[in-house]
Amino acid sequence: LRLHTRTMTNKNKKSAANKKSKVDKAEKAAEAATTEDEPVPEPQGDMFTSSQLAALIMLGIGAQKIYELSTAFDQGTENPDTCMTYLNDEATCSHPSFPSMIIAKFHSSVNLWFLTAIMIMVVWKTETYFSKLTTCLCMSPLSTTILGASMSQGDLSRGKYTQMMLICFALLCTSVPNSRDKIPFLTDKPLSVTSPQALCLVALFVVSLFDVVRLNGGELGRENALLETATLLPEKAKILVNFWCMDKLSMALIYLFALFHFPLDIQTNFLFLTAGLKMYEGLVQISSMAEPFQNASLIQTVVVATGIAAAVASMAPTKTKTKAE
């Protein structure tokens, strides 16, 4: 009887220990899941997280470049001081069709700036997404700006080339990811493209990527592959085409980021704001070009169609009914 009692007591102790171990594991798993999506603390006073500060600096630099493009366009071909500080080539800056190239780059820069601002706005309080987004912005537009400047090193003035490189490398060094969790596109969750929101993001990604690869140059050179101009542009004008392509590549990466990392509700909010931006691009920017894009009617149709698709996808349901277990 005593032996039986001791055996039962030992079994009860083991059972209690096993239950306690399972409870501890469950609590640790719940704590890890909670920590993974831990929101960024509200900024106190003028304090920001490092990711927020880096993103705001990138927006500030983008706004400065947009202002410089606007100034260069307003100066025209008679007094192209701003253009000369970049290219130091009077023949290109004084070309009658070069302002059309400037306004095309201005529009792409504005679109990228607002798209980046939308992304920052929808993830502002979530560190998990924000740190990955900052790294994505380091990939493009920062790294692509370095690539574009390197491709156009012979066309840029030495001072502007050095300035662009120093700014980009300084931001890269301060925003480089220090853990795997901050690297975008590395996720353990399976990628699903079955929802209307995901399908629309795939379409936006493909269209932006197509804009990059379609400008292969041809017989007239890369500088004349973007616009239908009255007279052919000089070779140095390809610098704006290169950076226009870098803008489109940055947009493609932003759409891909939203596809990989955002849940349906955030994808919906992002697409709602993106729809307005695409409609403005298609109905206002493209229509206002004095010298149109190559195949302008087709490009305008595609841009407006993606804007409508984004609006429709943003109204799609984000929750599906499941059967009771």
Image: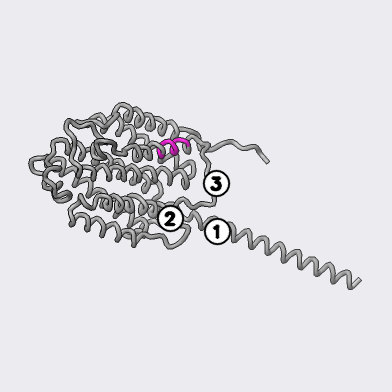
Residue at 31% from the left image edge and 45% from the top image edge? 246
Q: SS at mark 2? A: helix
Instruction: Tell me, yes or no, if residue 200 can be seen here.
Output: yes
Q: Position of residue 68 (x, y in %)?
A: 18, 47
Q: Is residue 62 left or right of residue 267?
A: left
Question: Which quarter of the image is occupied by the N terminus?
Answer: bottom right
Task: Tell which of 172 and 294 is nearer to you.
Answer: 294
Residue type at numbered disc 1: Ala
Residue carrying label 1: 32
Q: Is residue 200 magenta?
A: yes
Residue carrying label 2: 127
**Would you say the magenta stretch is mainly helix, strand or loop?**
helix
Q: Position of residue 229 (x, y in %)?
A: 20, 32
Question: Which quarter of the image is occupied by the C terminus?
Answer: top right
Residue at 20% from the left image edge and 40% from the top image edge? 102
Decide which of tag 3 and tag 1 comes sooner along the chain.
1
Residue carrying label 3: 190
Identify the image quadrant of residue 103.
top left
Evaluate if marks 3 and 1 touch, with contact meaning CB atoms under 8 Å apart.
Answer: no
Residue at 19% from the left image edge and 54% from the top image edge? 160
